[in-house]
Image (cartoon, rainbow, N blue to C red):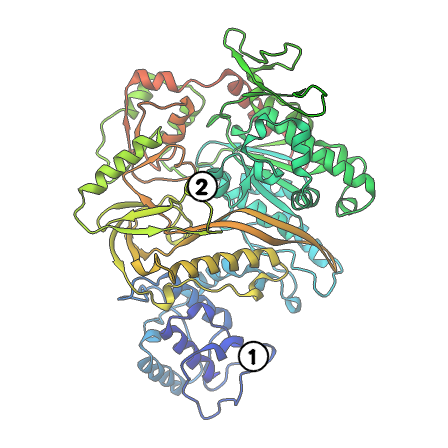
Amino acid sequence: MDLLISGLALEIDAGSLMNYSPAHQSRSTVPAPAPAAAPSSVKRPQEEQAEHDQEPSDVFYFDVHRSKAVKREANHQCGSRESPIKIEDDDDVVIKDEKDDAREAVIKKEQDYPAQAAIKREGDGFHEAAIKRERGFDEEEEVMRESEGFFPLKGYSDQTNEYIKRENDRPKGENDPAVAKAAPEFPLCPEQQHALDLAMQGHSLFITGSGGCGKSVLVKALNKALSAQEKIVYLVAPTGQAATNIDGRTTFSYAGWNVSASKETFSTLVKNSRYPSVFNRIESTDVLVIDEISMVEGEFLNRLSDVLGMLRRERFATGRGIICRKQTADSVRRPFGGIQVIAVGDFCQLSPVQPFEYCTEEVAYDPDHQTSTACGKLVFDKERNLHFCPRDREHPTFPDAQKWAFNSRTWADCNFQYIHLTKIHRQSDEKFITMLQKIRLGHTTDADLNVLLQPREVRNGIALFGHREKAKAYNDSELNKLLSRPEKFDALDHPKNLGEDRKNRFDKQLELKAGMPVVLLANLDVENGFCNGSQGKLVRFIRKLDECNKPKMPEKGNYKGDTYGFQIAYARYEQMTNYINGPSGAMGFPVIIFANGQNRVILPYCDMDDIETEVIPTENGYKKVLKSYSARTQIPLVPGWAMTIHKSQSLSLDRVSVNLQNVWCGRQTYVALSRARSLSGLKVIGNKLTMRSTLPLDPEVSRFMMEAERRAAAAPADQAND
């Protein structure tokens, strides 16, 4: 085991901490000093584990998990080239020893390897914390060791763990993937856990709650837990921005439709969804999670359900394919062809954009009536609050209230169980939380408005605008005031011909200057505060990356049974590495000091979309694999002076000023205000008249939300969907 310690010390010193494990000693590029009793070859993992299980020898040993946790901790703390490893005084690791001479041997090795000496040894506190963090990354390794049985997953309830344990105890083939792949990124609160338990039981759910209640966190936890059940899960959202926030795809892309789907006939939509790759995706789907459901038009939801249902029923009738092993004749007649649907969102926030724009009835456009097309545009009658076709009054008309998904026939047929998340995680000030809840429901008083409009000095706060042009103009003006030299970073697109107008949260070209405020657009290290929406200041650029700052190649062994997860991780790693080694990488990388006082080198981040997958048969069922994708890789920062309200969705901001002038949608006001973590960090630019005119809630939404709260409170925890 002396060799094990030497190898660890050298790997820490070389900055390659993330790649260390007993089975990987041979990867070290620096030869370790050979101890007297060193083995002539590296042991197999089984031999190392056997040695690990023995009593401590006269020398000493590192607990395997402890050494891995130390590496994780050191890697989290990697900073700039000048200070590659930052270890706090309370970041301790205890090295077990039996004799005084063993302790002296440790001290000697620490003198030989200063990087290891930086890891101080005073108590067991860091050991426990490090092991806890380690399990958050490699929970699969901890809970699925055959020799030790099942370990409950942290973050899941006893009910969910019992279900996973039963699944784990089923007789499986030799290559069957582990049921429990990973614990949630964050511990779930009881109401989030309740939603996850119901989803695991197969319920279709509607999950709602105000801004900051943890809906996005729950979506990711649902994806992990349901995928661990070997279910094929797809995450979708109505806009590219919303889809990016959950690492999903748009509703249009999922169904194989383009953005003009709203004016296509039903038969055209069915035809587009019959393409093999799309059909394979639709047939294999077990769970469809629709985020930002408030922005999904009711008629779009009907058409999506109808197309999916038709294709899945047709496939089931053939007696072939995946669907015949997963569905019954009764289940495929349900909405979406029997897919479990989980709708997530808040109807008090953004509404559907341009609902009922087209009449989609088929009309012939040639003399022989051999071809047909959609009729054309609908007209909105404000007096009757009705959308109708001006060409043919026999065509369907649509009351404006039907724009909401909850008023569609599909919504009623889904028989959702309602979950209302009430615990707010973004804000902690009860007074501010109460005020936001009243604003959300359109119930504001003059006293509330007076508090919101009080002048506050919010230094270095980001300004939120209703229009993109105003946000861009403000950023450009402030950037030009800085005298420091600009650095321009060009995005790396895959494939290369994605085009300048491609909608993405990352700009095609990003211009940065030292001294400017920035906002982080990616979850790099949530535990240490480097998350989507974190605000900071760019202090300098570094031209060369240390090993500890470079992206780490994913190891297939950490994705047991999850081929798709490994393929996605490797594709991202490949794109980020190509960026670093390309022209933009030669420009250097920004060092940001964040509001929490920590600094970090920001590497490129890969945003993937248009992901095409294929479901292939395996020895024990089916699995999802990556077929193709589009991606943009860019430094995940934006100027921190201004941003659109729409782009701020999902962000939690410490310092923000909200400009209510020219807000194009009343609900934008609530979305903007609820981005702030605290009232002290919020500045509102506007007046009472503007506030009163933008805050009222649609009566249809108000009625529905009252019903949703009633149903959520009345629903028993163990009630199953019919």
Q: Amino acid at mark 1?
A: Glu
* Residue 180 visible in the current orientation: yes
Residue ranking furthest to the top? 383
Badge 2 local density, few (<14 within 10 Å), some, or many (20+)? few
Tell us which disc is closer to us: 2 or 1.
2
Q: Is residue 129 above or below residue 367?
A: below
- Vertical order, 298 against 79 (above or below): above
Amino acid under disc 2:
Arg
Mark 2 and mark 1 lie on one chain; the one further toward the N terminus is: 1
**Residue 372, image x, y percentages:** 67, 24
Task: Assign a secondary structure to mark 1.
Answer: helix
Q: Is residue 233 left or right of residue 192?
A: right
Q: CA distance from mark 2 to mark 1?
A: 51 Å
Q: Residue at x 43, y 20 (%)?
A: 442
Residue 502 shows which numbered tag?
A: 2
Question: Which one is in front, 54 or 24?
Answer: 24
- From the viewer's perspective, tell me whether residue 228 is left or right of residue 83: right
Locate residue 222: give its quadrant.
Answer: top right
- Please tell me which residue is depicted at 50% across the width and 69% down the height of the picture: 65
| Residue 653 % position (x, y) | 34, 39
Residue, disc 1: 48
Determine the residue located farthest toward the bottom in the rendered image.
36
Where's residue 676, x and y in %? 35, 35
Rendered image quadrant of residue 167: bottom right
The residue depicted at 46 percent of the width and 31 percent of the height is 210
Q: Secondary structure at mark 2?
A: loop
Q: Position of residue 253 (x, y in %)?
A: 57, 39
With respect to residue 377, does 106 lie above or below?
below
The image quadrant where one finds the C terminus is: top right
Q: Residues within 10 Å of mark 1 (few under 14, many from 20)?
A: some
